Amino acid sequence: MSVNTKPPKLAIRLLNTFLRDDLVEEVQGDLDEKFQKDLKRESRYKAKWNYWYQTLNYLRPFAIKKFKRLSAMNNQLLGNYFKISARNILKHKMISVINVFSLAIGLAACVVIYLFVSDEQSFDSFHSKSSLIYRLDEVQKFTGTNEQRVALSMPGMGPALKRDFPEVNIYVRFWLRGKQLMIKDETKQLIDNVMVVDSTFFDIFDFPLVHGDVNTCLNRPLTILLTESTALKFFKSTEEALNKTIFWDDRDYQITGILKDVPENSHIQFEALMSMVTYTKGENNVNNSWGGNWMTTYLLLDPNSNIKRMEEKFPKFLSSHMDDPQINSYYKLFLQRLDQVHLASNDIEHDYINYRKFNGSYLMIFYVIAGFILVIAAVNFMNLTTARASHRWKEIGVRKTIGAKKLQLFGQFIFESVMLAGIALTVALLLDILLIPMLNDLIGRQLSIAQLFHNVWQLVAVLLATLSLGIITGIYPSFYMTSFDLSRLLKGGNKGEGKSVLRSTLVVIQFGLAIGMIVSTLIVIQQLSFMKESDIGFDKDQMLLVNMNNEANEKFETIKKELQKQSMIKGVTASGQRLGNNLHQWGFKVKADTGVLSITPSNVNVDYDYLTVYGMEMKEGRGFSKDNLNDNGRAFVINESFANELKLKETIGTRAGHDWYHNDSLGTIIGVVKDFNFNSLHYKVNTLALVVHPEWGYNELSVKIEKGRNAEGIAAVKKVWDELVPSYPFDYTFLDAHFEEVYRSDKQMSAVVTIMAGLSILISCIGLFGLAAITIEQKTKEIGVRKVLGATESQITVLLSRNFAGLIGIAFVIVSPVAYLTLQRWLETFAYRIEINLLVFVAGGVLALVIGMLVISYHTLRSARANPVQALRYE
Amino acid sequence: MIETRLGEFEEVILLLAGILGEEAYAFKIAEEFESQTKRSVSIGAVHSTLTRLEEKGFLKSEMGKATAERGGRRKRIYTITAYGKKTLTAAKEFKQALWDQFPGFATSKLSFVYS
């Protein structure tokens, strides 16, 4: 029999460890016999494999050893562990405080990040069918405009999809009407986020209805549902509101239901819902409307649907419903699962129904940062404990002599570190209770530590995480300390601490992460302030925006004249759309030498002096003028991008017009305006055509107010408004506030990164402080001798600092390229971005070095100045 | 209270122990089980059942003689007790009684009622 035909040794050992002693003989005999038999029939490999299988199958209650119950003794042991740990923690107060605090800060940061991330991820999760709900989106590629992904779809698409695709169970469409004035007797209220929805709304979404019938409330034309707080604006109670009517846009709508207020974590936010039937009855049935994209469609799919296969069938679907043979080169439909709508829509434009849209890829960054912080804190713990080992030689030695087993010593150290981790967790939660309200102010959230206690599993997870953190950070120091050789220990010998490769590596990791985060913070802040300060081509500051209705449009010239009389008002104009996002696109024709070109730029309807009031500069030609009669509807100012796209020899004077203009009655391009960023800086400037078309009506009045006179300005506008426009309340906002909202996701990320970078350098420095204290203490004698032999204070300071400075230097060299590449990738998500300045890296490194040196200088200077006599007497 | 009824697996193991007689030890029974039923079973599972059957009083066991073929280790040989035999017979008779009532397989002539 060859050596290799024996059963696997490891399996035998395993069997021996768990098998009851009185069974060992027979079982081993049986398994052996089985093994020999297998060997004859099958391969050696299979036989061994089977032996393992048989061994593991003996893990049954009847066969395993009864483990000795030593609860009394265990309690005693634990009690002893506890006592010793407590004494040790109290004895080395500084080190313990450093340990607990750095871990606590790390844990507190992680808890906050967890709360933040889970708040974002909770979006839309309250819909019971959320995994089957998809939003219909489009990729649009029109001539003359950048390719864009949009959240809009055509009204006809929903019904047609349900007819053509067996996968589509239900569709619901939203038609966002924005802010609307609703009237009940004397009460006039602006209701925001008014939407028109299909009657299938409740079949897909789980927004609770308080009063009314879920099945029928949206079935009739001219019916409306109000949320509780909207209803209370008009009625004393929600019950009273039911079945009453409310007046909007010249018609009475019956209130057929009252909805609960929409929860904060819903991407769809509304205050009133109107029935879609209102618009599908009669001749202008929107169900047959194709071509224009102005609705948002959600589909409830069959659980067995294959999204990919559906998307493959969309081109055929489009060409079967639309006459244009080119249709599939303009449009590509795609589906977006509900949970992606909130977190993965950052590259989606015309996304008007998406409250608090967040860039989901930042969540990953947050998790990584939380991990970094925890690593930095854990490193402190490990470093300080191992560096301090010399203090415990005697203890370990005595314990070993008395007969402590390695495992028991190990248990003692692990227990100690778990205990510290537990204390740290308590401190962390206290810190969070204090700091979360401040953080909420900073990033505009309602995070609460209480969320952690809502769910038992979360709590268990936090406790388990802390426990494992204690164990993991305890393992290395425990190994280190229990590995001492007994005889050397008791002699008080030296186990070559002072220079530990691992300890140095850990410091490098720590400072590497800290430097990386400092540099990232600097770059992120630079980019954000670049976006804030950079010349976007128009003046967004001090611009008051006022919502306009019909009456305001009718009296626009009067309002303007009245406002221009005020000294603090620098300009008054109006427009059909607000800047700060993409503008609506529609067809546009240009009559070139080669024929009429069709192009789809963004378009906006503006007042004559819009360009002047917003400070937009002309590149060529002239702006709009009231003196020129043709400028009303028949003159266009296009932007530079559009002019470049057209590549005409002579742009000014070229005949052009909107899609529906007859080729013979086109208007003229009268000017080219320099490119300005009407969209967020994540996007390149799109082609744009401006037109003056007062009959279409403007949506917003823009009033430029002198700096520092905001209050006065607002009061003046309100006074004029209330006098002239009694039918509509004065409702305003500032354009720069709107821009803040546009960059919210980026700003919150930068706030979190900044705070975390600060914390990481703080924790690293706390650790360095402790480490310096220990290593310098160990060198007391050396310093004494050097001083006696004539070393100067500065020489000694340099000697002591050199080591740490070197480590920080290595960390800098390692981390810089990694940070550079990561930041470069982040910056690429912006169409307009800063160049990374390498000086920033130098600044980050120097900052870390200076802080590090300052921190240890407390110890280095003290020991350098100490009287050498005391040093030599030491021990 | 000790459960005294026989499960299907237990019944088969008990029968096999009876069939194998002097050779009835865990490995042999498992092997026999596999060859007779074409189902795979681990020795551990058989051993566990044998222990249970012994606790119930259907089997008794003692260590056999040492043999060279398995490294000199002894086997535990199980023998069926009188109580075990009685329970097996009872189980068989009970089933037979059930079979006799089953029309599709009753030995008497088939009689279907048409109406």
Image (cartoon, rainbow, N blue to C red):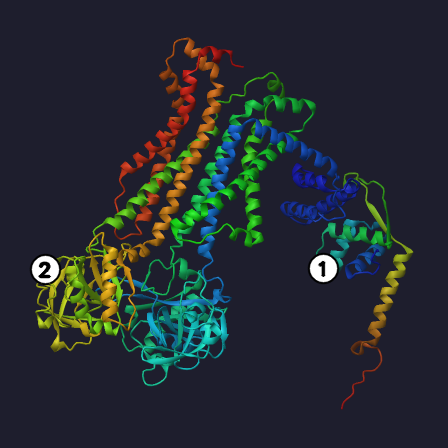
At x 43% / y 79%, what residue is drawn?
A: A244
**Mark 1 Cα within 10 Å, few/some/many (few <14, many 20+)?**
few
Identified by mark 2, the residue type is Glu
Q: Which residue is mark 1?
A: B38
Asked where in the image residue A4 lies, by quadrant, the reply is top right
Asked whether, in this view, residue B49 is left or right of residue A845, the answer is right
Residue A578 visible in this rendered orientation of the protein? no
Q: State the quadrant of the N terminus of chain A.
A: top right
Q: Nearer the viewer, mark 1 or mark 2?
A: 2
- The residue positioned 67% from the left and 31% from the top of the image is A80
Pointer 2 chain: A
Question: Could you tell me which secondary element the residue under label 2 belongs to?
Answer: strand
Q: Position of residue A689 (x, y in %)?
A: 18, 65
Residue in front for this viewpoint, A658 or A732? A732
Residue that lies at the very extreme toward the bottom in this rendered image: B115
Q: Residue beneath label 2, please?
A: A620
In the structure shown, which secondary structural element does the residue marked by tag 1 occupy?
loop
- The residue drawn where x is 57% and y is 45% is A463
Image x and y of residue A721, in percent: 24, 67
Establish if A120 lies above or below A296.
Answer: above
Can residue A38 be seen here?
Answer: yes
**Vertical side of A870 occupied by A559: above or below:** below
Chain where mark 1 sits: B
- Work out which quarter of the rendered image holds the C terminus of chain A and state it: top right
Residue nearest the observer in this picture, B53 or A38: B53
| Image location of residue A523, percent across then percent down | 31, 43
Q: Position of residue A754 (x, y in %)?
A: 37, 43
User: Mark 1 to mark 2: distance in Å?
Assistant: 92 Å
Against A325, residue A571 (above or below) is above
Relative to A551, is A246 on the left or the right?
A: right
Residue A301 in the figure: left or right of residue A602: right
